[in-house]
């Protein structure tokens, strides 16, 4: 990112910013006057200048034209509970800045729920925001209005709740020499009651809202500036294709005094403009979830400070401990850094054998590709946590040219030692992006080395250790890689013994979903078996909740004609279903459900035992569940969950694979 600061940014560093820097213990920045500023101000001299020094030099005074400041907050969602702490800090920072008012760009609460939880989150958010010393104004985002609950959603979903507790979905007001217009970008389809931000026909603003915008712009036609706020940055294209944003832009263009538009939703900074004299700013987050923490690339918690003068405005982004010019975060720059973030080690070949006594030896081939248009400095090593491994890789440095690929071989060895801390070896990269005018240190990334299991002794699965997996959260889940499972298309059976410690929420017991594949879920304690066939989910649901602190056998069967669920050997539900199972590369989790990054989410809470997946429809009628399952020729996974081998649990099926324990996976007595 260029290191220079624009004239507009210099003008926006106000006394409030200097105050914040002082309070935070940060260095302050001062600027000499530039003669090439796009907007110059006369600096009058008058009798207010006084000195006792005998100097002929009279300093020009600051201009005295009217100016005011307001602050804009980004998204708050996805960061609970840490996001609330960030929001609290933003409120404190804002009070130090002392602007005239605070605007938001939506996604104020986590939402996607029913009214009782919505009300709690609303009250929690307002309690924090009401600590502001100035007025704040809400904008509705999808998290604030989308209903996700049992039964049919109320008309408008959470629209009425929002308007009752936050205010109108669209509105306008005047402050000094500026008009403020808030729009609503999640009207959806009032006929079908659908809301979605990635469906073209649901992206359009209604005639009623456009009439409001027309009238609001007329009311503000004599003002120096108009500012527009909404949640979705529909001008960026992509998933917003199909909206009528061009109509909105043309209306603002015809008004002639719309200075800037602010939005959020994408959780990283972006600047588009000016377009027809209108500047488009997209904020990252103010407490929301960040896909990465790279402040120099616009992935950060921040607030925008807007300085308004009669004939111009300036916008500055204020993260913790720094001031940035958001106009530097062009789509081109963000794209460059996003390409650099893709640089990571790829294990192209592994010949590392693991023995059941804990010893291992072999080598792996590592490949690193740089798809970005800039060179990168790379340091490769075996992760510092893997001290129980001996390696030929020792912080090797290289400059990886733009578009280049480097390949190298790493030898690894582990000695059987019961006293050593067990780790999975990881190839780690420290990455520095070499920009045009700066170097950006990107977060370190690493890739685990996949081990192959050597011969397993015949008595290893004797069953002497009668244990089970205790799941207390996502970090307790066991991961089974997709290629390890290798479940073919066609009929199959998924089964396990489950013992929940609580039944609230949607929980993944054995899951490999993500708009595809299959899972056994616990929905408010009621087990269900889901299978995705040709892109559509078929779900067989039980009727009763699992009993807390009691063991229950649950089996899901797809036989090519139907999806069925059995509870303690009794068929509870059968749903007609045909098609080909839609697959994905995500891992299967025992005790959780994979998210769209392949990480465990929506964890089961309780105990799990005897997980078996078989490439055939084992059960055709009621049966007596076996307490300890045995493998067949068609078993693709069998985890007895009796014992561990370091960070692994071994698979008793003919596939002879391994499941990887989570950081908090615990085996306890059955």
Image: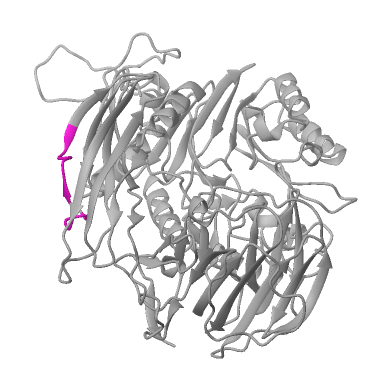
Q: Nearer the viewer, residue 478 or 624?
A: 624
- Give the residue drawn at x 49%, y 38%: 268
Decide: is 384 above or below 358. above
Q: Position of residue 557 (x, y in %)?
A: 71, 69
Decide: is 429 above or below 571. above
What stretch of residues is rendered in magenta? 385-396
Magenta stretch: residue 394 in it? yes
Q: Position of residue 259 (x, y in %)?
A: 60, 25
Predominant secondary structure in magenta?
Answer: loop
Q: Does residue 140 appear anywhere in the picture?
A: no
Q: Nearer the viewer, residue 130 or 112?
A: 112
User: From the image, which quarter does the N terminus lie in?
Assistant: top left
Q: Position of residue 271 (x, y in %)?
A: 52, 27
Decide: is 24 above or below 295. below
Q: Nearer the viewer, residue 590 or 371?
A: 590
- Give the residue drawn at x 75%, y 22%: 250
Magenta stretch: residue 139 in it? no
Q: How many marks?
A: 0
- Give the residue drawn at x 25%, y 35%: 409
From the viewer's perspective, tell me whether residue 187 is left or right of residue 95. right
């Amino acid at each position: 990112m260029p290191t220079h600061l624009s004239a507009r940014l210099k003008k926006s560093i106000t006394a409030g910013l200097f105050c914040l820097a002082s309070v935070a213990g940060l260095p302050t920045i001062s600027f000499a006057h530039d003669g090439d500023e796009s907007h110059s101000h006369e600096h009058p001299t008058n009798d207010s200048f006084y000195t006792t020094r005998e100097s002929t030099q009279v300093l020009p005074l600051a201009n005295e034209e009217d100016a005011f400041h307001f602050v804009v907050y980004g998204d708050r969602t996805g960061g609970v509970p840490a996001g609330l702490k960030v929001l609290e800090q933003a409120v404190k920072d804002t009070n130090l800045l002392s602007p005239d008012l605070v605007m938001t760009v939506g996604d104020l609460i986590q939402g996607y729920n029913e009214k009782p939880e919505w009300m709690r989150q609303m009250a929690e958010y307002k309690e924090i925001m009401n600590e502001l010393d100035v007025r704040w104004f809400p904008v509705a985002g999808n998290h604030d209005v989308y209903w996700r609950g049992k039964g049919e959603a109320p008309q408008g979903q959470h629209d009425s709740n929002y308007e009752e507790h936050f205010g109108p979905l669209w509105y306008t007001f005047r402050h000094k020499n500026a008009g403020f217009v808030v729009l609503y970008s999640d009207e959806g389809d009032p006929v079908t009651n659908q809301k979605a931000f990635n469906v073209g026909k649901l992206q359009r603003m209604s005639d009623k809202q456009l009439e409001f915008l027309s009238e609001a712009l007329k009311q503000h036609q004599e003002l120096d500036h108009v500012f527009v706020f909404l949640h979705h940055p529909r001008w960026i294209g992509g998933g917003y294709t199909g909206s009528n944003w061009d109509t909105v832009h043309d209306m603002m263009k015809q008004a002639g005094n719309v200075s800037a538009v602010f939005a959020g939703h994408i959780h990283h900074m972006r600047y588009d403009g000016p377009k027809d004299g209108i500047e488009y700013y997209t904020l990252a987050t103010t407490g929301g979830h960040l896909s990465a923490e790279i402040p120099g690339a616009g992935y950060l918690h921040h607030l925008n400070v807007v300085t308004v003068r009669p004939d111009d405005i300036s916008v500055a982004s204020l993260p913790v401990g720094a001031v940035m010019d958001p106009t530097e975060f062009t789509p081109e720059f963000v794209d460059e850094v996003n390409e650099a973030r893709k640089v990571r080690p790829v294990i192209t070949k592994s010949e590392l054998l693991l023995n059941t006594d804990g010893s291992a030896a072999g080598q792996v081939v590592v490949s690193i590709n740089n798809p970005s248009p800039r060179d990168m400095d790379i340091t490769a090593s075996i992760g510092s946590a893997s001290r129980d491994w001996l390696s030929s890789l020792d912080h090797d440095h290289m400059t990886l040219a733009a578009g280049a690929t480097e390949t190298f071989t790493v030898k690894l060895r582990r000695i059987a030692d019961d006293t050593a801390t067990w780790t999975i070896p990881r190839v780690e990269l420290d990455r520095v992006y070499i920009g045009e005018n700066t170097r950006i240190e990107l977060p370190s990334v690493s890739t685990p080395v996949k081990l192959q299991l050597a011969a397993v002794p015949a008595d290893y699965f004797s069953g002497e250790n009668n244990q089970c997996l205790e799941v207390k959260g996502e970090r307790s889940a066991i991961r089974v890689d997709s290629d390890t499972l290798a479940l073919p298309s066609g009929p199959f059976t998924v089964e396990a013994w489950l013992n929940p410690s609580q039944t609230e929420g949607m929980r993944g017991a054995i899951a490999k979903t993500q708009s595809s594949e299959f899972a056994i879920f616990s929905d408010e304690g009621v087990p269900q078996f889901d299978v995705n066939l040709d892109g559509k989910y078929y779900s067989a649901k039980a009727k009763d909740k699992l009993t807390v602190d009691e063991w229950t056998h649950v089996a899901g069967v797809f036989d090519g004609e139907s999806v069925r669920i059995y509870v303690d050997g009794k068929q509870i539900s059968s749903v007609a279903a045909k098609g080909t199972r839609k697959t994905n590369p995500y891992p299967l989790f025992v005790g959780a459900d994979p998210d769209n990054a392949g990480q465990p989410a929506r964890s089961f809470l309780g105990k799990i035992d005897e997980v078996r997946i078989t490439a055939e429809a084992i059960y055709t009628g009621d049966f007596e569940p076996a307490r300890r399952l045995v493998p067949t020729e068609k078993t693709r996974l069998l985890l007895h969950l009796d014992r561990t081998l370091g960070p692994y649990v071994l698979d008793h099926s003919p596939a002879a694979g391994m499941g990887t324990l989570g950081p908090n996976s615990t085996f306890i007595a059955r």
